[in-house]
Amino acid sequence: MVESKPSQQNFLEQILYYWHAILRWKWTGLTVALIILVITVGVIFIFPHVYSARGTIWIDEGSNILPFEDLNRLSGEINAQSHSMLLTSRSLVGEVIDRLKLADNPDFTGGKKIVAHRSASKDTIKYKEKVIDNFLKNLSVTPISGTKLIEVTFNHQNPELAAQILNTLFDCYIEMLVKRKYYASEQATEFLTNQMAALQKDIEENEKKLSELSTEQGILPTSSAEAPLLTKITEVNAALTAATLDRVNKLSNYNQLKSMRPEDISVADSNSALAKLKEQYLLLSREYARRLANIKPEYPEMQKLKSEIEATYEALQAEKENMIKSAYADYLGALAKEQNLQRLLDELKAQVYKTNSNVILYNSLKIETDNKKALLEALSKRQSETDLASRLKDLQALNVWVVDKASVPVDPSFPNRKKTLLIGLILALLGGAGTSLFINYLVATVKSSRDVSQATGLATIGTIPAFEKEFKPKGPLAEYRSLRNLLSGRPDSGDKRRTKAVRTKERSDLSPAVTGIKGQAATRRIELILAREPQSIQAESFRSIRTTLMLSLMDSNRKAFLLSSPLSQDGKSSVISNLGLALAQAHKKVVIVDSDLRKPRQDKIFELDYSWGLSHFLSSIVDATEVILPTPYTNLFIVPAGNAQIPPLEALLSDKMKAFITFLKQQYDFVLLDSPPLLAISDALVLSKIVDNLILVVRAGQTPISALKQVKAKLDAHHLNCLGVIINGVSLLEQEGYYSRQYYHYSKPL
């Protein structure tokens, strides 16, 4: 239970971190959310309405109204996936388009028509293919899982036309199944008719011979001596009849196999190669039709899928050829058996003729005639059954029933206003929050001590809270300007017009009684805030930094501190002036050296009138004691930069500068040097070699983390140690830790 509290606290801190990141860029996030909502409203009210006509068909796998075995058993039962593929076949769609003349219908084609005299041209054929592609894009076939039902949907802007197209599709599909289902039966009927005609001719010739023998020879019943030969002839005739019927069935099987498509052939063994190839072919074909609704056929992935379908179909075709060869071999075997029996029968007849047994010849001829009559009767029955099956196509006795025909849709399926608006609101919330978080990640500025530690491994000496009301950008324009500056790599100086107005007000509200310094404003400015508002949270933060430095450097002779920053406008000059005042208030003798000879700032902060400065001393114009000036604050002195025209870098590199720092360390408890930014010029690197400690100052929400990393790499390259980092302008609400937020609320005035 004890271990869960830190994890819960860390989780809450992460949530608060993301929440404040969203608030920091709230106007940008709101702009993105508003754009998404405008697009959503545009989709709802501008996009044309699309209506979906829906129908349902039922697949009855076991229906058969015939009392005998259907000859088309080899075609097998077509499952739901097969029906789905057939419903989206281009041949069926082309039939529907031709029947309804959709290619000439402006409502369907968008105003285009096919020119009659160019019906055979390549352009017209290409146009028809495009019409079929457009039809398939609007057609959706979905088998309902766990049932024998298939839902078919067609989308179009015209609801009446959508319903008409779908109902016509059902009619054309049933007609196609009828034609295909009984095509094999018609072929079998024709084959049996031819076989029966030949058999009828043989029977008539045999009966004629029987009549002649009976009349000429006066045939009597067979004697006992001739009975064995007659019995043998009877057995051979019976075997010949069975062989003939087997040969006819196998020839019918062979012819039917040749007339069928590979995917229509079924096998009893589901694990056979043909069954696996059929399953693979149906899955690939369905996937191709599904993707065709969103992807053009010319795309590489569609071409690859089409190649796989063709390869699978070729394998099916090869397997079909093997089955045809096997059926043909069975037929040849049956034919050879029939021929062998026929030769045996002829030999027995020859024996009869050699023995001049007219009675045996008569009886054998009679038996052969009777057997052929029995074969004729069997074939006649078979032909009647097959003919009945082929004629049932007029009754449309199929296993596909239209359960629900398409009715004219009343409400549009797209856009669904409620659903689209709900999705738009969700996307607006996610898009706005995501944009704020992405920008917060993209700008990647220092915001807390955790960022400093993760980026450089340096310790955070202290943080200076920001003035939320005065300096945080307000309004969308200020936020956009801040974002533009950060993305372009320029420091965020806030709203310049607003800052100028604040400073004008500060100069107008002079209160010499508060500070005793000419021109010091009574408003909440960070410069010398320890003197103006000693009870403020910012003043307390400087005293905390003072305590940290004094405790960490106790009993140490390291008195000289150089304060620098990665970039300009990080507030290092304000920090060093307040830090010097805090040390002076602790009864320490402090001197601030403005070593930024290019853009000095300390003389403006303390509003000093002076004649000599550091540049004059380095130019050997005056002595060291003449450039050290007192301030209105006890124990606090300042060395202004001066205005002598000398090369700054060479002057700071001189031995005279080193001697001056040594002199100040002997006279004062703390020596604080204000220097230019580290990444801009090399002055700070030169000064780092002659001081005891280096402290970096960064501004929260402005100093890029990349700039801080570059400074650390630069210091490491020159083998310079950094005592730590002071973070300026930190929002306590975003600073990690529960007590920081408590401190924020504690600091608010009652």
Image (cartoon, grey):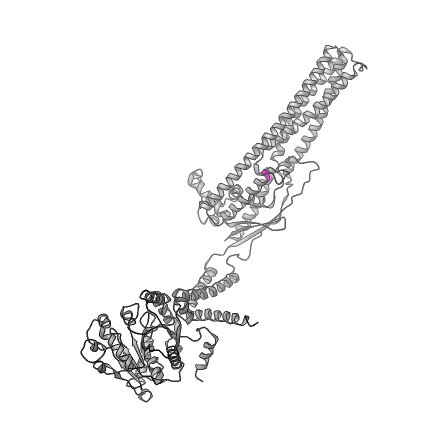
Question: 65 or 629, which lies in front?
Answer: 629
- From which residue to which does the magenta span run? 266-275
Residue projecting furthest to the bottom: 513
From the image, which quarter does the N terminus lie in? bottom right
Q: Position of residue 585 (x, y in %)?
A: 35, 85
Q: Is residue 298 left or right of residue 634?
A: right
Q: Position of residue 723 (x, y in %)?
A: 36, 73
Indicate yes or no whether the magenta region holds residue 696. Answer: no
Q: Is residue 114 visible?
A: no
Give the prevailing secondary structure in the magenta stretch: loop
Q: Position of residue 441 (x, y in %)?
A: 41, 65
Residue projecting furthest to the left: 621
**Quarter where residue 674 is shown:** bottom left
Q: Position of residue 743 (x, y in %)?
A: 45, 79
From the image, which quarter does the C terminus lie in? bottom left
Residue projecting furthest to the right: 224
Q: Is residue 524 left or right of residue 405?
A: left
Numbered circles on residues, count: 0
353 is higher (above) or lower (below) than 681: above
Indicate yes or no whether the magenta region holds residue 272. Answer: yes
Q: Is residue 55 left or right of residue 425?
A: right
Q: Is residue 64 left or right of residue 81?
A: right
**Quarter where residue 525 is shown:** bottom left
Question: 606 or 336, which lies in front?
Answer: 606
Q: Is residue 388 visible?
A: yes
Question: 10 or 66, which lies in front?
Answer: 10
14 is higher (above) or lower (below) than 501: above
Question: 552 or 486, which lies in front?
Answer: 552
